[in-house]
Every structure is written in structure tokens, then in C-alpha cells.
Image: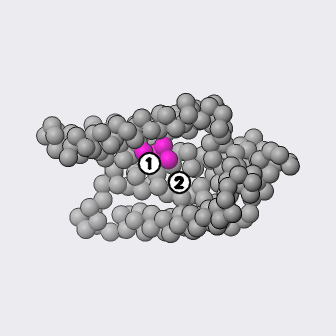
Amino acid sequence: MTDWAYPDGFKSSSQVANWINVVGAVCCVFLLASWSFLAAEKTHRHYLSISLTCAVSFMNASCLQSRGRKPDQCFNEITPHGMNSSSLCTASGVFLIGGGWAGVMWVFLRTLSLHLQICWQIVVGRGFMWLSQLLGWGIPIIGLVIALTVSGVSFRFGQTCHVNHRNNLAAFWVPLLVFAGVTIIMQFATF
């Protein structure tokens, strides 16, 4: 379908994006390793930064797992493989959707933390940390389950599975964009 629906250079653009993910994954591993092995006062590590880096690593993993092998994207002549017919598709879709949700949530939580500290002079403490862990990982899990249940994933373009068109607005895009929109508004209010 990619050959018919997209311009001629689209496949090479998809390959470039996959290689950018490889560079991103190396940077994430470097950050996580430095936070693990270096002193906290030197790295200024924080649970909000670590969690966001983990979320980005999940998105990178969706493209990395297919780098070593060329997945069979077609179930038959007219149907792409989906999460019900390809475990590689399921894994890449889970990493992409879950990582995307987690990335948006952790940016939202970083913005909320900054907003509370600057605008309301509230010192966020241990309670905020535990609430952040609950929301930062819990909401992405719920969003992932809803997206997979209501819409599903399949090979749409490239070697990574993406959310299907059926019900994707209600199951994935609108809730994700609501959190992103609230984040932007809160960031502008903080400024």
C-alpha cells in the first residue's frame, strides 16, 4: 500500500526516520546509563527526566526491533499484517502507542510540576512523585489497552505497526491531543 498511496521518496524518508530512532536510542541509553552510574549532584537526575527518557526509549524500541529483520508486512495480496497475525507487528505497535502516550504524559507532568512551583509556589514533594508515577504510567497503559481493543494496529507504512484507521480518533488521537493541548496551555500560562 505504501508504494501506491505515498510519493516515490516516502520509503527512503521512512528509512531515514528509522535511523534517526537508532541515534535517539543511543542517546537515551547514554542518558540512562549516566544517571545510573554517576553521582546525582553531577547529573541532576530527577524522576521526571528519567521517566520521560524511558518513554522516548519505548518509542525508539518500536523502530529498533524491526531494524535487524525485514518483517513480512502483507498477510495476503490486499491485507496488511496486523496485531492478530504478526507478533512483530503487535510488539512494535505496543511500543509505539505506549511510548507515545507515556511521552505525552511525562511532558504534561513536568509542565504541571513547573506550573505548580512557579505560579502557585507549591513545593512538589513525595506525594506528587507517587501521583506522577501512577498517572505517568497508568494513563498510558489504559490508553494503550483502549487503542488496541477499539482500533488495533497493523502495518500502514514502513516497518513499524501504527494504529488502524477504524475508531483511531476516539481511541487514540483525541485523548492524546487533549493532554498535549492542556500541556501547551499550561506552559503558556506558566510563562
Specify few, some or many for label 2: CA neighbours under 10 Å numbering under 14, 14-19, or 20 or more: many
Is 128 drawn above or below residue 100 in the view shown? Answer: above
Residue 69 in the magenta stretch? The answer is no
The range drawn in magenta is: 100-104
Color theme of the render:
one colour
Check disc 1 and report the residue beneath it.
Answer: 103
Numbered disc 1: secondary structure: helix
Q: Please state which amino acid type lies under the numbered disc 1.
A: Gly
Relative to residue 112, is residue 68 drawn left or right?
Answer: right
Residue 103 in the magenta stretch? The answer is yes
Q: Is residue 36 visible?
A: yes
Check disc 2 and report the residue beneath it.
Answer: 59
| Occupied quadrant, residue 160 | bottom right
The residue located at (42%, 35%) in the rendering is 178
Q: Is residue 109 visible?
A: no
Q: Please state which amino acid type lies under the numbered disc 2.
A: Met
| Occupied quadrant, residue 50 | bottom left
Residue 25 location (% of width, % of height): 50, 64
